[in-house]
Image (tube, helix red, strand yellow):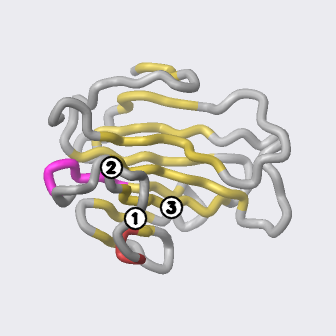
Amino acid sequence: MTAMTPGSNIPLSAARIAVDVAAPVRLDVSGLLLTADGKVRSDDDFIFYNQPAGPGVSYRSGGGAAPDAIVVDTSAVPPGIEKIVVTASPDAAGQTFQGIEPTATVRDAESGAVLATFTPPRLGSETALVVVEVYLRNGA
C-alpha cells in the first residue's frame, strides 16, 4: 500500500478499482469522465448518487455505514476519455473541509486490497476537492 502525497501518482495494478472517500461528516462523492481538453462530453459523464452509472464508472453508496465510492473499470472506459476525476464536498450546506480532511482509499475492486491512500493536508475554506484522478498515460 502507498500513502500518497499531493501531486504523487502510482501505476494501477488492477483493471477495476474502487475509490472510497471517508470523512467524519457525510460527503457528496462524484466521478467526472473528462476528455483530453478537461471537459465532460455531456451530463452522462457526471456520475453521482442521482446518476450512479456511466460508461466504465459507477457510484456506490456506503449507506451511511461505509464510505461512498466511485468504481472505475479501466477496460470499459470509452475511447476519448483521458481522465476520471473523483471529487468530494461536504453534504451540509456551507460547510468547509477545515478540520474534516477526507481520506481516499484506492482499492482493487475485485479483491478489496488497498492499493493507495490519500489524505489532503492543511485544508481550510475549501468546499469541494478533487481527491483522486485516474488517468491514461502512455496508453495505460
Would residue 87 be found to the left or right of residue 52 on screen? right
Kindly check if marks 2 and 3 are in contact, taking CB atoms under 8 A apart as contact. no
Give percent across and percent down for residue 116: 42, 28
Q: Nearer the viewer, residue 98 or 136?
A: 136
The answer to which of marks 1 and 3 sits earlier in the sequence is 3
Give amino acid for label 2.
Answer: Ala
Give the alpha-carbon distance from disc 2 to disc 3, as whole Å.
19 Å
Q: Residue at x 53, y 40 (%)?
A: 104
Disc 2 element: loop
Q: Tell me the residue at 72%/58% (across/down).
A: 90
Measure the alpha-carbon separation of dots 1 and 3.
13 Å
Instruction: Name the residue beneath numbered marker 1.
Output: 40
Vertical relation: 140 (above or below) 89: above
Q: Please, what is the three-letter code of the amino acid marked with disc 3?
A: Ser
Picture residue at 54% right of the left edge, 31% below the top: 118
Q: Secondary structure at mark 1?
A: loop
* Residue furthest to the front: 37
Q: Which residues are magenta?
A: 71-76
Q: Residues within 10 Å of mark 2 (few under 14, many from 20)?
A: few
Helix, strand or loop at label 3? It is strand
**Quadrant into which the N terminus falls:** top left
Q: Position of residue 82 (x, y in %)?
A: 29, 48
**Spatial CA span between label 1 and label 2:** 10 Å
- As drawn, 120 above or below 97: above
Q: Kindly indicate the quadrant of the structure image that contains residue 25.
A: bottom right
Asked if residue 121 lies left or right of residue 118, the reply is right
| Image vertical order of residue 38 relative to residue 1, above or below | below
Mark 3 — residue?
A: 30
Q: Is residue 96 above or below residue 55?
A: above
The label on residue 36 is 2
Q: Are marks 1 and 2 in contact (CB under 8 Å)?
A: no
Residue type at mark 1: give it.
Val
